Image (tube, coloured by chain):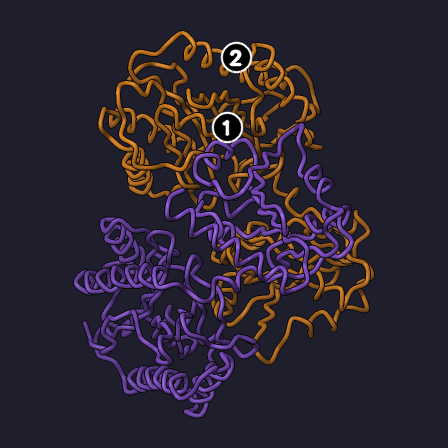
Chain colours: A orange, B purple
């Protein structure tokens, strides 16, 4: 068995420990990212349900169909393949194991109502199970991979600064970013957001055909890199042309809000994620600017957004080995928006920033 | 109001008619494609729930958060924006309308168990509602857009044939395809599948770093184009080098299976989709080859896979204006696979093929 198979086997073992801890007899894992985390196999569609992992005390299956069975046979050896098809139904597998399963765990956020109805035919007690939380604390290898993605992101940012000039469109910048990232052997982790001028006041602006002019003042770039399955994510807002005092003030306050959040995390142990969100949010409001219309930050790994969540409702506690973003922003309709986003890893009680592009809000 | 807004308003009107027909008082639409179909707005993430459409007899809302509200305000005028946030909850909106809603329709395939639990707090009778079926019959404008995507796909196929040579990798071909499609002002509708030799026996092979050699015999290309929101999808299998009689036989049978499916559809009216699947499937099996490990075909439009489904369990009836694929395949582990996929539109009782790349299985 190759090294990586041992790693995936170990993750399944940890999953089984969590199953036991939560008094469950088995779990059905349906999210593509969690399946990737437990197997290393990353080719299932996120648009359609093409696989499950079904784990009990004494069994472990990957359920998929004939389109994938040969790939799974060669690449996933620590789980038994159950190939569902026109004659062999997943229901048969459930029937086989239903006696030993009193309590089944499912990912309620990752399972549809239709799927749940099917499961109810076989299992009486179906409970929520948070398989994604396994991923929130990263190994050193995972952290190194995310750092690599961040490094490529930093290179891409430096590269794109040279391309910014009057007349270029948002889409052209996004394309240049993507080409650069691909040349480095990586891919984008999500469609890049490039917003000029007033477009920057829409936090998730749809990159379009707008051409850059000297009157735009602000350029917001939010993009990420994915390499070996792991994502980065970074936002920078750049001045373009003669900016007003208001623009500068917005930038100063956003940067200060990020600093305050960092200081707060460094000030103690077992910090509540929602309290970090509050520190930055309240600071921005105290300066007379509108509330941040999104969370302050999010964990990152195989997915761009995963545990922990730094948001007002979060129940997460920040722990060693977590990797997450801190991204305060101020958005003023019909004027413009400023967001600064960096990734951090919590190591030895201290937050270490792993995106390293300059935050000097220089004019290009 | 611009022309396109009238079109989207009309679609919401049709949705309301269907709601009434199914004795529902309101529906909550959660799938991103259906939201796009009803609004024209396509920037919501498919990874996370960022919006709903909530339609009743006397109201119509789009529910989203502050990240999108400015974009929705300017681009979607036929629905009322409900901006959910830290102080304003979706639950407030549900409370406001719960008295007039005895039966609520939801997309059970597109709603999570967690979301359903939340809805149950407000609504007693929650039923399945198939909002996607609205999309299965296309307007002439939609058909024309899909044809345009197919045309770019045909151009891309002709282009890529010239690039095929010993030593090139699967990924390089996929990249060339993607670049060509982008140069034509379109994007790929899904990650292209490029499979050399034995890799072609995995129907959804993950395009990799394998280099093409004269011993590979088969090259399977499955790719699609997306333009103005609409998708194409096509598969061709090409001979490379000296092929055996078995390879040729596989190709002949796959082509013949596709022909038989076409003839069957042209032979009558209101044909059942599952019967078309059966015709092709049984033919392949009758020739001693393995059963097709996937559906014979699928509808296509805003999504690569949508209604109707040409599969053994399908309840769909083929109707005028439907656009779908017919894609029989034979896959032999450790040997190779052959799949031929074309898109068709059912017009005036006759199936018209809209992907027009050659099916001659020439050696390159």
Label 1 vs 2, first from the N-terminus: 2
Q: Is residue B343 above or below residue B208?
A: below
The residue tagged with tag 1: helix, strand or loop?
A: strand
The residue nearer to you, when weighing B171 against B161, is B161
Residue A289 vs residue A95: left or right? left
Q: Residue at x 63, y 19 (%)?
A: A265
Q: Which residue is drawn at 32% across and 36% down?
A: A174
Q: Residue at x 63, y 17 (%)?
A: A279
Q: How many labels does the image show?
A: 2
Please give the label number shown on residue B79. none
Q: Which quarter of the figure is the N terminus of chain B placed in?
A: top left
The residue nearer to you, when weighing B305 against A108, is B305
The residue tagged with tag 2: helix, strand or loop?
A: helix
Dot in front, 1 or 2: 2
Percent across and percent down for residue B280 are 43, 84
Q: Is residue A317 visible?
A: yes
Q: Residue at x 44, y 73 (%)?
A: B297
Q: Mark 1 lies on which chain?
A: A
* Separation of residues labelled 1 and 2 (CA atoms): 16 Å
Mark 2 Cα-neighbour bin, 10 Å: few <14, some 14–19, many ≥20: some
Q: Is residue A148 visible?
A: no
**Residues tagged 1 and 2 counted as in contact (Cβ below 8 A):** no
Please give the label number shown on residue A256. 2
Query: Which residue is label 1 attached to?
Result: A343
Percent across and percent down for residue B276 are 46, 82
Image quadrant of residue B351?
bottom left
Residue B144 vs residue B201: left or right? left
């Amino acid at each position: 068995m190759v090294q990586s198979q041992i790693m995936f086997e170990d993750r399944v073992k940890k999953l089984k420990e969590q199953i036991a801890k939560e008094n469950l007899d088995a779990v059905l894992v349906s999210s593509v990212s969690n399946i990737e985390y437990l197997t290393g196999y990353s080719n299932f569609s996120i648009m359609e349900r093409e696989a499950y992992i079904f784990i009990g005390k004494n069994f472990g299956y990957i359920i998929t169909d004939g389109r994938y069975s040969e790939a799974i046979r060669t690449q996933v050896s620590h789980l038994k393949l159950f190939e569902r098809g026109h004659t062999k139904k997943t229901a048969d597998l459930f029937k086989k194991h239903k006696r030993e399963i009193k309590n089944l765990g499912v990912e309620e956020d990752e399972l549809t109502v239709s799927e749940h109805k099917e499961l109810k035919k076989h299992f009486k007690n179906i409970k929520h199970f948070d398989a994604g939380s396994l991923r929130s604390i990263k190994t050193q290898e995972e952290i190194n991979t995310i750092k690599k993605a961040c490094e490529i992101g930093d290179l891409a940012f430096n590269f794109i600064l040279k391309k910014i000039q009057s007349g270029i469109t948002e889409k052209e910048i996004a394309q240049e970013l993507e080409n650069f990232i691909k040349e480095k052997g990586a891919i984008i982790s999500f469609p890049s957001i490039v917003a000029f001028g007033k477009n920057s006041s829409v936090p998730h602006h749809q990159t379009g055909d707008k051409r850059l002019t000297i009157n735009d003042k602000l350029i917001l770039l939010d993009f990420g890199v994915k390499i070996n399955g792991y994502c980065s994510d970074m936002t920078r807002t750049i001045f373009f042309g003669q900016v007003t005092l208001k623009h500068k003030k917005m930038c100063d306050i956003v940067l200060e809000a990020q600093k305050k959040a960092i200081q707060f995390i460094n000030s103690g142990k077992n910090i509540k994620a929602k309290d970090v969100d509050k520190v930055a949010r309240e600071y921005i409001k105290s300066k007379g600017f509108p509330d941040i219309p999104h969370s302050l930050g999010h964990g990152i790994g195989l997915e761009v957004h995963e545990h922990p969540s730094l948001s007002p409702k979060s129940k997460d506690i920040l722990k060693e080995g977590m990797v997450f973003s801190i991204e305060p922003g101020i958005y003023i309709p019909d004027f413009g928006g400023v967001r600064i986003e960096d990734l951090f890893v919590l190591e030895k009680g201290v937050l270490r920033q792993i995106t390293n592009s300059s935050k000097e809000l220089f004019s290009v």
